[in-house]
Amino acid sequence: MSWTFVFALAVIAYAFKVLGLVLIGDRPLPPMLDRCVELIPAALIAALVVKDTFSVGQQLQIDARVAGVAAAVIAAWRKAPLIAVIVIGAAVTAALRALT
Amino acid sequence: MMSIAISRMWRDDRLRAVFAACVTLGLAVGVFAISFGVASVSAGASVAQTCVLSLLVFTGASQFSAVSVLGAGGSPASALGGGALLAARNGAYGLAMAPHLKGRLGTRLIAAQLTIDESTAMAAAQDDEAHRSAAFWITGVSVYVFWNIGTLVGALLGSAVDPKVYGLDAAFPAAFVAMLWPSLRERRSATAALIGATVCLALIPFTPIGVPILCAAVGVLVGIPAPQDGAP
């Protein structure tokens, strides 16, 4: 691996991260845009959850993670603290893998 | 900004909960970081290059993808392309976080480096401005610390435990479910989340890795119509 590659990837990654700062900064947004921007975490984090739960690379796959995340959903619904939801999700997944 | 967040944390139940969750999630981050360190060195990077990747790129998915493409004999250009597709969602997070991260330009340039899945989701889970910014910093800094220590350990050690044995691959979606949960009570957020999840799932088999999550952003279009009076 070349150092050029290392720094090129670093520049690309930071360019994306700093984009919001450059485009929006601390300017107030028009209300419509503001409403849309506020929904970005909900749309993307929900996508991330299904990606992390149901896929490996480009393949859809049902495995122990589905049970772990289902348990996490129940825990979140029952208002368990965040730390408990994380531990439950990992523990159920690990237990199921150990058993099968 | 950071010292304010830290001193406030101990007097605030909600921030203590954020911190406790960050340490737990941090352990999972650390174990994945160790396996990144191992993967990177075995793909031909030096220990120094591996550590600089984690310090400067600080986007786990991009880093894993880049070293796996190079390790499999792929060209640097394709490794950069794949890495960029996975880094692009941080651009959307930056748009979402920009209105909430006040302060001097220098502080916000540091905040940009910490703009990742975990910090954005944890911030979004808070329901007022002060907690949002504090949760962002606590999460961003703790993931940064665990990610970089883990990378160094993995690069030096050359062997790692399989995160799957401890179900740590499920720790992240579990955490994101919990962070997302409070916002789902609001109808627009719930609709945006449903659209995002459906689009992502539908695209996974057909598009390059990283693209499905970017396309999930169409979910935000439910924000276009002005809210009607009385509707939540």
Image (tube, coloured by chain):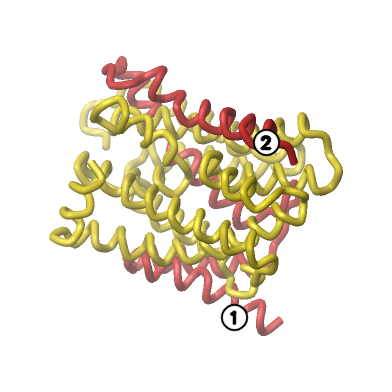
Query: Is B139 left, or right, of B151 in this rendering?
Result: left
Label 1, label 2: how many angstroms apart (C-alpha)? 42 Å
Residue A8 in the image, given as x and y percentages of width and height: 64, 29
The red one among the chains is A
Residue at the disc numbered 2? A3
* Chain letter, disc 1 residue: A
Residue at the disc numbered 1? A95
Give the amino acid at mark 2: Trp
Tell me which numbered mark, 1 or 2, is placed earlier along the sequence. Answer: 2
Q: Colour of chain B?
A: yellow
User: Is there CB contact under 8 Å for labels 1 and 2?
Assistant: no
Query: Is A68 left, or right, of B72 in this rendering?
Result: left
Near mark 2 (Cα within 10 A), the count class, few <14, some 14-19 or many ≥20, is: some
The residue located at (53%, 29%) in the rendering is B218
Give the amino acid at mark 1: Ala
| Above-or-below relation of B114 to A86 | above
Q: Is residue B223 visible?
A: no
Please tell me if label 1 and label 2 are on a single chain. Answer: yes
